Image (tube, helix red, strand yellow):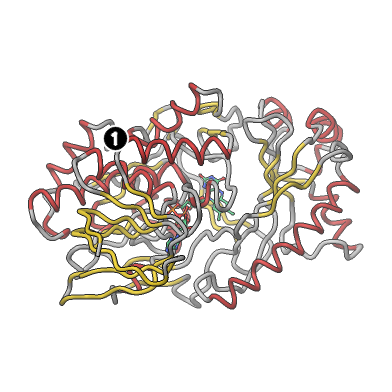
Amino acid sequence: MKEFDVIVVGGGISGVIAAVAASRNGMKTLVVESAGYPGGALTVNSVAPMMTFHAGKEQVVKGITDELISRLQAKGKSTGHVFSSDPNTATSTFTFFDQEAMKYELELMLLESGVELLYHSMLAKVTMKDKEIDFITVCNKAGLMGLKGKIYIDATGDADLTVMSGTGYDKGRPEDGKTQPMTLMVKFENVDTDKVREFIRQNPDSFPQFGSVEYLLNREQLCPEGFVNEMKKAKEAGEISIPRENILFFESSNKGEIYFNTTRIINHDPTDPWSLSEAETIGRKQAWELDRFVRKYIPGFEHALMVQTGPKVGVRSSRQLQGQYQLTEQDILNETIFEDGVALCGYYIDIHSPEGEGTKHVTLRKGAKYSIPYRCLVPKETTNLLVCGRSISATFTAQAAIRTTPTVGAMGQAAGTAAALAVRDQVKVQNVDTKELCRILKEQGAVLS
Ligand SMILES: Cc1cc2nc3c(=O)[nH]c(=O)nc-3n(C[C@H](O)[C@H](O)[C@H](O)COP(=O)(O)OP(=O)(O)OC[C@H]3O[C@@H](n4cnc5c(N)ncnc54)[C@H](O)[C@@H]3O)c2cc1C
């Protein structure tokens, strides 16, 4: 059985950054990923742009996650961090990027830092020895394969490793267990964005959530949320079954390339394979409705081509670790900076309704930031497991704020560095010296206060 110091399961943004951090801190590190490339939601689900590296004017996410953007920017594959000119927008910056370049750059960072990659491999089983993970078994083309690590990092987003190790977890809202809806992202090329802008300029009443459409039109990358009148007409005509009241899309760093964050799949469970499969089919049906909708109602899409769905339906929330501390809405609203804070976040609470139409936004004071304590990454009992990314220990509401990509990247750096410390000092994850962890994180570029 192959042995490693640190095994990261899940090669999304949090898992990649965790692996790079562990490896740069001297650990023999492996990433196990079910897709054939890294990036998770940013590439497997086509999520874009990254929001937000900033709280107001202050950059609160730096370190390895920011290094990724600098590398992409140097190759002309990211805009870098673009400040929002709209005082009503809750996110301080948008970071646009090219999706293929993102895949490649993440992979380069992994390889350059000496991380071993095992793609096309899915976690199948976890073998425990008391409260410690002894080894994991993955399923791939070779059949079942055992892998042994000293510390394991669960970066699967859905806390798969946590669940299979018998570690405590929560799922969904406390009142009914419902999670945020899933979304199959839809990508279009060759959109005439000048024409779309003209339509927006002439139909401001279709964009009610913007104080003025000028803010929207001033952005170099077009990112509107609206078209409510057109959506209403299409729904009345029975052309659209998407349980959402408006259309949301983002242009990427490539002109005329648009990612729709508009399909909405409710009442499905992302951790139930049958339900997840059905979610894909519903998402695909909605994507083709969207294709017909944009051609009929939005000038600028006449020559556009829908080039991709997914590739996989996107999951906003599912299972959360029951950690040593559970981050709460109150911690966010109080702008709490914890003594063992290992990542900072400036994003607001953004809950897409599990019921259908509507998105609940709890915006924060301009410039507000809060921290994520190390204890949210640490299980109550399992001694050699850390969790990073969207499935850390947080309430349903708090998770809706800390789930976005710059923040989970920062958490990844914290998890990878903590894993390296646990191996170096031969301690349980519960006993990692958090003062030393914070010192190293800061020394290696992270912002913690
Ligand atoms: C539709 C949608 C829109 C969003 N919009 C934005 C946005 O505009 N901006 C923003 O910043 N954030 C956005 N988010 C949030 C953000 O994308 C995610 O919360 C974040 O990327 C989560 O990162 P992660 O590393 O925790 O998990 P993921 O990115 O989900 O990565 C998990 C990885 O683990 C792999 N994996 C899972 N299970 C296993 C297993 N059992 N075995 C092996 N591998 C496994 C997966 O293939 C994946 O690569 C959005 C999310 C969704 C779903």
- Mark 1 nearby-residue class (10 Å; few <14, some 14–19, many ≥20): many
Q: Position of residue 386 (x, y in %)?
A: 26, 59
For the point 29% across and 34% down, the residue is 447
Q: Secondary structure at mark 1?
A: loop
Above or below: residue 16 compared with residue 386: above
Above or below: residue 414 compared with residue 108: below
Determine the image quadrant of residue 174.
Answer: bottom left
Residue closer to the observer: 102 or 296 = 102
For the point 34% across and 35% down, the residue is 112
Q: Mark 1 sits on what residue?
A: 446
Identified by mark 1, the residue type is: Ala
Q: Position of residue 8 (x, y in %)?
A: 32, 55
Residue closer to the observer: 151 or 14 = 151
Residue closer to the observer: 43 or 37 = 37
Determine the image quadrant of residue 312.
Answer: bottom right
Q: Position of residue 429 (x, y in %)?
A: 17, 58
Q: Is mark 1 within 8 Å of ligand 1?
A: no
